[in-house]
Image (cartoon, rainbow, N blue to C red):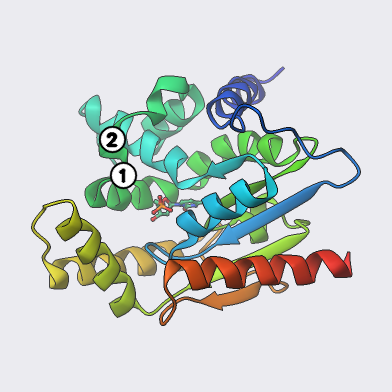
Amino acid sequence: MSPIKQASLRLDSRVGRLYERPSGQRARRSGSRMIIAIDGPAASGKGTIARRIAAHYRLPHLDTGLLYRATAAALIAEDRDLYDEAAAVAVARGLGLTDFNDATLRTRQMGEAASVVAAMPRVRAALIEAQRAFAARPGGAVIDGRDIGTVICPDAEVKIFVTASAAARAQRRALELVQHGERADYNAILADIIRRDARDSNRSVAPLRPADDAMTLDTTHLGIEAASAEALRIIEAARTRV
Ligand code: DC
């Protein structure tokens, strides 16, 4: 077996265990497999919507941004150059269970660093199989990211592209920081979001874009309750068609 395949399988089992469905919840029976792909830009609400959808359908959920964040975090921790593709690939192949626990993964700076390593074709290649293996679970899965509907799960039963204006997204991030008692610089956050959108959308491999068959959900004027309800409506409508 090739080293890439071996590394992917190891990550498959670890990612699988990390995101196991909550205890007491039973897997959906095979025969009703449902892969729900949720893509969108930073702070669009896709992560929260994906978690709620997963809880609703009792499906396991994978936040694929964490894979890129953990890769960037390991490089930074080892004092490596963030633009060193070979080092980033080695880290991505070696990701393990404890690599996803660190609270710093969720910071704005780590999102920016993740966006840098995520633009590297070989880093993406190193992480594809683990994501597909997660999607291939018997009952299905909810997976969120940037390229789930286009590259990782092009045959997903439901694809939703969650978006919102950059200003609305920056406002949300600023509010989150203030609620956590931190200082929020709206202009810096907005600049960060615009820069990240541009990098994620203009990269050569798996750029951020809606799949041709994705339903777009614009959350600019929606609270999280309304946005989640709309996502559910889209999914139910899609299920009646399959
Ligand atoms: O969803 P997030 O903010 O945690 O993602 C962090 C970065 O990782 C994002 O800017 C781009 C990258 N990413 C990606 O390229 N593909 C994915 N499927 C998920 C995230």
Disc 1 to disc 2, C-alpha distance: 6 Å
Taking the spot 38% from the left edge, 68% from the top edge, the residue there is 197
Say whether residue 137 is left or right of residue 167. right
Q: Secondary structure at mark 2?
A: helix
Measured from the top left, where is residue 237 in percent x and y? 77, 72
Per the rendering, the mark at residue 106 is 1
User: Mark 2: which amino acid?
Assistant: Ala
Measured from the top left, where is residue 178 in percent x and y? 15, 59
Vertical relation: 215 (above or below) 119 = below
Measured from the top left, where is residue 191 in percent x and y? 21, 70
Q: Are marks 1 and 2 in contact (CB under 8 Å)?
A: yes
Per the rendering, the mark at residue 103 is 2
User: Mark 1: which amino acid?
Assistant: Arg
Vertical relation: 224 (above or below) 56 = below
Taking the spot 65% from the left edge, 61% from the top edge, the residue there is 150
Mark 2 residue CB less than 8 A from any atom of ligand 1: no
Taking the spot 11% from the left edge, 66% from the top edge, the residue there is 185
Taking the spot 50% from the left edge, 45% from the top edge, the residue there is 63
Mark 1 residue CB less than 8 A from any atom of ligand 1: no
Residue at the far left in the pictured view: 183
Vertical relation: 47 (above or below) 207 = above
**158 or 94: which is nearer to us?**
158
Say whether residue 48 is left or right of residue 171. right
Residue at the far front in the pictured view: 24
Measured from the top left, where is residue 85 in percent x and y? 39, 38
- Mark 1 crowdedness (10 Å alpha carbons): few <14, some 14-19, many ≥20: some
The C terminus lies in quadrant: bottom right
